Amino acid sequence: MSDQVSRRQVLSVLGAAALGLSRPRAAFTMSAPAGTVAIGKCRTYDRAAVLSTLQTAFDQLGGLGRLVKGKTVSIKLNLNGGPNRRLGYLPLEESHFPHPVLVGAAMQLMGKAGAQRVRLLECAWAPSTAPLEDHLMEAGWDWRLLLGTVPKVEFENTNFLGTGKKYSRFKVPFGGFLYPAYDLNHCYEDCDVFISITKPKDHSTCGVTLGMKNVFGTTPLTLYGSGVGVDKDNEIKELPNNGRMEILHYGRRQPSSLVLPEIDPQSSRNDGYRIPRCIVDLVAARPVHLTIFDAVLSMAGGQGAGLRSVQTKPGLIVVGNNPVSSDAVMTALMNYDPAADKGQTPFTTCDNTMALGESVGLGTRDLNRIEVAGAPIKDNICDYLALRKARQPRPGPGFETKRST
Amino acid sequence: MEPLSSWTPMRWPSGPLEAGIRQKKDRFSTELKETLERWHMPAALSFLKGSPVNCLVVSWAAGLPEDAAQQKSLGPLMEAGRREGLKFAGLITGPADKRAAMQAARSAGLQAIVAEGETPKGDLPVIPLAEVASAPWGSSPTILALAGARWPGVRGQADPRESNDINAAATHLAWIDSNIYLMQLARAQARRTPVWLMFEAPDDTILTPEAYLRAVADTGAAGAQWAVSLGTRLRSGLANGSAEALQTWRRIADALAFFPKHPEWAFFRSKAVLGVLSDFAGNNQMLGEEMLVLLARRNLPFRVILRSAAATADLTGLKAILCLDQETPDGAARQRLASFVEQGGLLLASEKWGREGAPAPGVNNPRFDVRTLGKGRLAVLKESSPDPYLVARDAHFLLDRVNDLLRFYNISTTICRFISAGGGKPDVLQFVNFARRDPADGIPLWLHDSYRTARLWSLGDNAAATVKLSPELGGVTAQLPSVPIYGALELS
């Protein structure tokens, strides 16, 4: 398995960015690298089944050893929403949090492949500044079960400096759509391998939330959170309660002067425009080496538990070595078209993040160029599209109903 | 006469004395003046018929010129009340001549006196009115009227005087005023003394019927009785015979009737893995009480241990003890705590405790120096004035959420009291939901213990509903329905 997207590769295709996105549908950027994506069937979170499925998937990508042997691995978890918000009575990991069994199995295989250290990272839901372990425990994970899977296991809540002394600045190699650089917790820099683990879900702003979107959650609220000082960061205790809305979502103001300002403050303030671009900036600046989708059980109708959300049972574990290609295959498995343009389902009100990523050479979303290993896409579709069509229009004020779960 | 402990009290502000007192305060409106006058008339009692309220706490003496007129003019009201089976307790406050006031009360036929401070001996029962720290617990009062309680609710929602800009804490969780922690402190002082909480409904906000129900529920869940105190708007409505006001009152009365059906719950012991040890007095009062508030807000059940009883307190079931007093326990109490640690417990102590044992490997807490000692751990504060919020959070983390007794999901506005009678009787988890809107979702409640059955009581219920339990993480998850105000889960 190769380290598919390096900063050097991104730089090599900088010219693609200039091409923009106004081309006809499915006019893929041919220079964008194509990854391999392995699809494994897995109906339960039985540890042995998950281990076996993951092992096969990693092997289909060329083996984990080449990527992680002797290395420090940072894993960005997608613990979206608060740890005490469930979809009905379902445990979080059966709807929108990655399942600890899957994360533990992946770590075990990394340990077996020679990884020296694994850091589990998340900007634990704003504005909690508790240690990540505390956040995990509140969600029902026993983090101690993950200890021993690799020689060194660490946890960090990356919503603030954490164990670091300063933030790491990640410049966007192609210059950036939204910002020229992003300042993140040191753990995103102090690693050799960066992995995104998430569940496939619908997303109100981005259409879908997948491996790339997960990286949006690396931005610390101390710097990019609403209410941040003009010339100082948010103190840990003062983290805001509406996340990144003011600055990253809507661009109503610039972030603290401690970080670089927007490239073009006159650009659209629509979050359907901004967030996909922010994601691509981040993925270009902090390349994702491996994407793991926990699609055994997931949810549709939103990224977190909500009135319009329902549990889904794709029964799959999907692993890919290119962030755009991985998301494209997962999008297809959700019965959405990864080649869809803005205005088309599921990107009805936003740009297609994969298309933007492809345009700057992060990877291809062209299913014809992506090598799919394991179970075929067509036989394993979980029909998010049908669920989307079946949902009622977004409720207005006063709307009260209960979903069935 | 029925014992005082069976009384269901209601504060009855009326007459010239109450007007005199309130004239000195802001917001003495015409509506308030008229309401005080109308509540002084016998006809005002009519709405009480059929309600559990059987004792009216009337203003009796405050050391003001209106005292005499008040006592004289209360006659018709009390006479009418007695015909309806009501008892009357006279409230004596301020610089009143207590001896004279008590003699007058006896002559007027009052059944009891509620009074601050020392009172002359007499044959009229006296219900002491005091704050927790200064209450005469040692005198074993028949009932204690507790001052210092707050109107329960989300800060800024029901009490705008507190400023709307502080209705959320650093955690983004809404700040909730509840009296459950206060009563746990009171119960540590006197386990079986019945307690009246003397808090008033705020007049400067519109209170919904649900706000009143939460006041009843919070007090009942705390194991106390609210000396029901209605806001001027509702009292005015009741005096005017408003159908809406009467409907609100009926709901309040139904709620008041619920807790006397479960009298034993008031005296059950807290089910907890964390003990909070302090004298809750002097320099330690603020931090000690703040810790109780913050731990309660985390739904981390605790047991209050008074420093004076530390040497002999029952530590059964506790995994950790938080002891942040500036004067650390000495002698037998210190030995007891040291032994608790040696045997595997966690002691979180102020920096005054001193450092013992060896640094705990792999633990790097910003506020506590964590050390191993025997089979347990000693966590000593690194600074003398820590942020209470962070200390509460650290305490929870160092205690380890593996030891959590419960976790609520889909609801962030609850305060609970987890109690146990022991002896094979069901545990009871009472909780109040302070959210303004009904939760649309069900409430998953994870419980550490593997209970087999769960029955849910809601406010006003005459029968409990069975709740489904499903195994999860070594315990069970109770699938609670939406609980808009109050629930009591009986767990066997």
Image (tube, coloured by chain):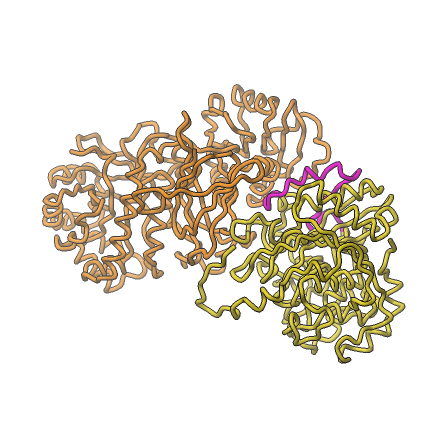
Picture quadrant where residue B237 is located: bottom left
Picture quadrant where residue B225 is located: top left
Position of residue A378 measured from the top left corner of the image (x, y, whole percent)? 72, 62
x 45%, y 25%: residue: B309
* Vertical order, A258 against B88 (above or below): below
x 39%, y 51%: residue: B485
Task: In the picture, one chain is orange; tell me its letter.
Answer: B
- How many circles with numbers are drawn on the protein? 0
B79 left or right of A355?
left
Position of residue A237 measured from the top left corner of the image (x, y, whole percent)? 61, 52
- The shade of chain A is yellow
Residue at the far front: name it. A379
Q: Nearer the viewer, residue A105 or B20?
A: A105
* Vertical order, A240 against B48 (above or below): below
Residue B112 in sight here: yes
Picture quadrant where residue A225 is located: bottom right
Residue A160 in sight here: no
B209 left or right of A305?
left
Image quadrant occupied by the C terminus of chain B: top left
| Residue A144 is inside the magenta segment | yes
The region drawn magenta spans A137-165
x 55%, y 23%: residue: B334
Q: Which of B220 and A360 is in front in this view?
A: A360
